[in-house]
Amino acid sequence: MAKMIADSWVMAGVRDMKKSIAFYAKLGLKPAMNRPYYAELNLPGGTVLGLHSIGAEKGKKPKIAKRMSDGGWGIMLRVKNIEKVVAELKRKRIRCSKVETAPGGADFTSLHDPDGNRLVLVEMK
């Protein structure tokens, strides 16, 4: 799978994107990418912090995380051809969630390590 990974970053689920961006701005961080449901902040040292909305979409009920590992922090791994990667992981008996499309068009799936730590595979469109 490592051959399929293009890059990685840390991500956090946020309930209010504007409020979260304002918080990080107070720390001197400005979004390198800023979309309504996703933002990336370049941290000193080369780490990228991705903020993704787990709040309500316009006209829909708020999406509430089912468990702490569904929100909060996680590691995101950018891949090419997410369907192929998921099929390969399935052959290796690693369970992934259903591939979904986030607002803005990125396809993603998540999986958990044996301790419940979340990894999210994402293919940006």
Image (tube, rainbow, N blue to C red):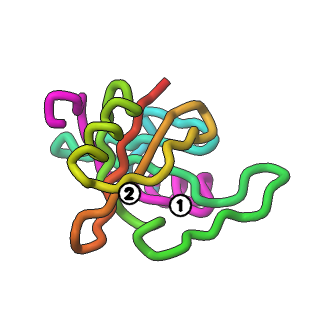
In space, the residues marked 2 and 1 are separated at their CA atoms by 17 Å
Q: Position of residue 2 (x, y in %)?
A: 15, 35
Circle 1 residues within 10 Å: few <14, some 14–19, many ≥20: many
Q: What element does badge 1 sit on?
A: strand
Which callout, 2 or 1, points to the residue nearer the camera? 1
**What residue does disc 1 label?**
14
| Picture quadrant where residue 119 is located | bottom left
Q: Answer with mark 2 or mark 1, whichever residue precedes in sequence.
A: 1
Q: Is residue 1 left or right of residue 40?
A: left
Is residue 59 rendered magenta in the image? no
What residue is shown with label 2? 27
**Residue 63 picture quarter:** bottom right
Compared with 70, 48 (above or below) is above
Where is residue 106? Give x, y as percent.
51, 33
What residue is drawn where x is 48% and y is 59%?
A: 13
Task: Look at 33% across and 25% down and name the residue there.
Answer: 80
In terms of depth relative to the viewer, which is nearer, 82 or 120? 82
Magenta stretch containing residue 5, yes or no? yes
Q: Position of residue 91 (x, y in %)?
A: 25, 44
Magenta stretch bounds? 1-25
**Amino acid type at image mark 2:** Leu
Q: Position of residue 43 (x, y in %)?
A: 27, 46
- Residue at 73 percent of width and 51 percent of height: 57
Amino acid type at image mark 1: Val
